[in-house]
Amino acid sequence: MDKLIIRGGRRLEGEIRISGAKNSALPILLSSLLTDERVIISNVPHLHDITTSLTLLGNMGAEVVIDEKLNVEVDPSTITSQTAPYELVRTMRASILVLGPLLARHGRASVSLPGGCAIGSRPVNIHIRGLQEMGADIVVENGFIEATTHGKRLQGAEIDLGMVTVTGTENLMAAATLAKGTTLLHQAAKEPEVVDLANYLNTLGARIEGAGSDHITIHGVEQLTGGHYRVMPDRIETGTYLIAAAITGGRVKLKDTDPTLLTVVLEKLQETGATIRCGSDWIELDMEGKRPKAVDLVTAPYPDFPTDMQAQFTALNAIAQGSGKITENVFENRFMHVQELQRMGAKIELSGSSVTVHGVESLTAAPVMATDLRASASLVLAGLVARGNTVVDRIYHIDRGYETIEEKLAQLGASIRRVPGNYKGQVVREGSASE
Ligand code: EPU
């Protein structure tokens, strides 16, 4: 298992480009199972979760070709299996996104039930109930979701999801594209990734209306065609690099992104004292060498503050002026980074679903490790400002969601390098004198 070594204390400056969105590319690639024709997806990020998705499609019999520009071409006409095995679902919960497309196109699916994970129990009951309401017969046996339509088409239905679920909305929306009749999804997730998936499916001939609102209408069609689609920019990667600039007092310009996807995140960053300028596909943040001010925030489904940016703001508050209260309302266990940040000298009090972070002037390096993707990102951010060499272990979490993070941070001037898992280098602790 590789590690990252970060020598803190450098102010980040420069320009980098933002990759395609992981959480769009995953449902887009996996819902290619809805058609029999070739699709070409561009701006696909080079990430472990993408490799897992392509392996999943390949295992089912789809032909997958990646060209030199990282366009991914999927030919699903050769599918012979409708099974998502435990070995793959275990490493990537988003594998559940094959359930709706397989059932809608092939009339059956056998998908390993994802277990709980580091950020919460994360059940998939709403995915299952919605498909049952569309006429599927589903049982959970031996750890697998066994679903069949008994050779019939799914039926359009009026489904109230009951709570906001991103992949739940995506699974049901995708399945409904081939259902007989019209499906109405109430309390649908409004996340931009849901809209991106709807736009993709519509380019293949689906008839989806209202994506991005609480109510999505899907008029079922007999079949989908092939097509070409470009994945939207990754708003969470964008936000993470903006924080990297803010936490180090630096200035970065991020290209190939979309500021309209990050309205509340940009507002929070302005509250920290950063100056932000935007164009249609770029964002520049300038902290002018200042120490950020701590902010309060509450996570909630889009368009409110994203849970996937919570850990990074916790790291920012850790070195900010003043105290900030952060409340996590989406996942019940998403504060695993707090103990690691405390080991670096952060002053954080945890109480139920909130933390209060009292900013300190500086953090100190420590060997740290994280249990999920965004928590790992927060430790890298903390490492950028800690005195000494921070060693972040278990970075396979980061590789699931951040394309070449060490190259991008190095391009902005960070001192960071990847070392193999057996690295035994010393963790250098600096004295309290400022550098
Ligand atoms: N939930 C249920 N039942 C369900 C589905 C969800 O109770 O059937 C609950 C969950 O336990 C959770 C809440 O609903 O408490 C919201 O979960 P959601 O289903 O929206 O999460 P998800 O679809 O599994 C996606 C992203 C996550 C992101 C969340 C919230 C993908 C592949 N994953 O997960 O991304 O945190 O939405 O925005 O799109 C990440 O990228 O690091 C990541 C974890």
Image (cartoon, rainbow, N blue to C red):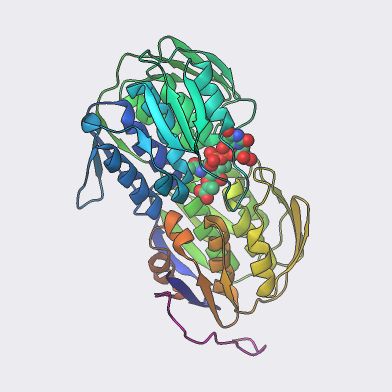
Residue at the image position 52 percent from the left and 20 percent from the top: 132
Q: Which residues are magenta?
A: 419-434
Instruction: Identify whether 151 is placed above or below 372.
Output: above
What residue do we see at 53% from left, 61% from top?
A: 377
From the top left corner, tell me how far across and down residue 276 is, in percent.
55, 55
- When the figure is inspected, residue 302 is found, relative to residue 186, above or below; the finding is below
Q: Given the current orientation, which residue lies at the most extreme front position?
A: 142
* Helix, strand or loop for the magenta stretch, by majority: loop
Q: How many marks?
A: 0
When the figure is inspected, residue 347 is found, relative to residue 142, above or below; the finding is: below
The picture places residue 281, in percent across and down from the top left corner, at: 41, 47
Which quadrant of the figure contains the C terminus?
bottom right
Q: Residue at x 56, y 60 (%)?
A: 371
Note whether residue 1 is visible.
yes
Based on the picture, tell me whether residue 282 belongs to the magenta stretch.
Answer: no
Report which quarter residue 413 is drawn in.
bottom left
Residue 158 position by quadrant: top right
Q: x, y percentage for residue 431?
A: 64, 90
Is residue 303 among what the camera can see?
no
Q: x and y percent of residue 429 in the render?
A: 60, 87
Q: Is residue 217 left or right of residue 151?
A: right
